[in-house]
Image: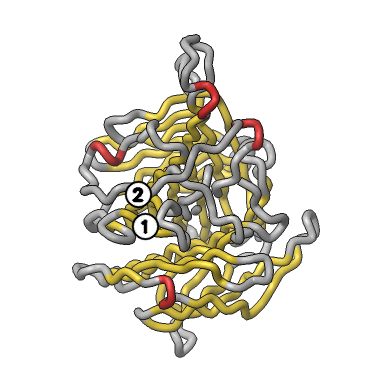
Amino acid sequence: MALSSFSLSRRSLLLLAALGAAPAAWALPARALQFPRDFGSHPDLHTEWWYITGHAKAAGGREFGFQVTFFRSRVEATQGMRSAFAAKNLVFAHAAVTDLEGRVLLHDQRIARAGFGVAEASETDTAVRIRDWSLVREGGVYVARIPAGEFMLELRFTPTQPVLLQGNAGLSRKGPDESQASYYYSEPQLKAQGKLTLKGQPFEVDGAAWLDHEWSQALMHPEAVGWDWIGMNLDDGSALTAFHLRRADGSALWGGGSFRPRDGVARIFRNDEVRFESLKTWDSPRTQARYPTQWRVQTPAGNFEVRALLDDQELDSRGSTGGVYWEGVSDLLDAQGRRVGRGYLEMTGYAAPLRL
């Protein structure tokens, strides 16, 4: 997700305290995003991530969800250092596979300083790497190669629709203060193809995916403890984004999103036009966090229900970005209870408030 006024991830944005002092917050100027340049990295800003989630099916009908997220974080305290060994940017990555038949989530993570051929984030186009993990845009197609501990992803993501600019022409507000904003675009309805290997067993898969790319300078509002976000590919080719940031009492601090019909113009949601209502919760046996795994989401594009396909899709990223969050494949139902799409739900700040 994917939200961006923070120091690391959506869509997954949980900053290590060791990064040092946060940068001063200032309002990002409105500007026209330019491609392919803005597919690449923006190291002048503090936080950035590329986030792909999706679902796929193997020939025998076995279904999976998957997540690949790369983060870049600028380390302000080292920017004036001349040494090549100074960690001026850190690169992180998370990857996960939800095996719906096996009812299990597998996940892994990486962290490294940028440079020395170990980790990099190109400024000219999407090309982010940490050792043997990579997400690269080649000829307009995204290629992810993630050899993780218990699984491997070798997937290609082909755009089928134009880039979707979120917020005001790509400048997306994330809080009541103008400084709480990000540059943000999405590529929904990506065609996903390739190979997924699960504990040594390979599967040729086809499916659909969603990409978010955000970069920002500001931190989250001091009253916010976390957020809930959805990115949904509808079966008719439409794309739905909705999110809200929560206070400690569960009330919404700020909301937003968008809806774009297939071959249509996106409608951008105002702060007061989105509402999340919890319908069902699941308690994590590991962290005791209580996550809403079924939601009613009200938007100007209609009222929907979001239903997790597996309750236990909690990820522990304390080995990289430092927090615990819930990120999982979910179905989208319309007001009549009919399934109309599938995508990802992300929830943060339930195991502990985010302190960024």
Packing grade of label 1 (10 A; few <14, some 14-19, many >=20) is many
Image mark for residue 58 = none
According to the picture, the residue beneath numbered tag 2 turns out to be 183
Rendered image quadrant of residue 98: bottom right
| Residue 322 visible in rendering | yes
Three-letter residue code for mark 1: Ser
Find numbered disc 1 in the image and state the secondary structure of the residue it sits on. Answer: strand
Residue at the image point whose x is 53% and y is 80% from the top = 296
Rendered image quadrant of residue 278: bottom right
Instruction: Give coordinates of residue 162: x percent, y percent.
Output: 22, 56
Question: 46 left or right of 240?
Answer: right
Looking at the image, which residue sits at the far top? Answer: 83
According to the picture, the residue beneath numbered tag 1 turns out to be 172
Against 151, residue 344 (above or below) is below
Packing grade of label 2 (10 A; few <14, some 14-19, many >=20) is many
Foreground of the two, 187 or 54: 187
**Render colour scheme:** secondary structure
| Residue 190 visible in rendering | no
Instruction: Give coordinates of residue 33: x percent, y percent.
Output: 24, 46
Residue at the image point whose x is 50% and y is 37% from the top = 23
Question: 33 left or right of 249?
Answer: left
Residue at the image point whose x is 36% and y is 34% from the top = 41
Foreground of the two, 93 or 174: 174
Three-letter residue code for mark 2: Tyr
Q: Is label 1 in contact with label 2 (beta carbons under 8 Å)?
A: yes
Against 243, residue 4 (above or below) is above
Find numbered disc 2 in the image and state the secondary structure of the residue it sits on. Answer: strand
Against 125, residue 197 (above or below) is below
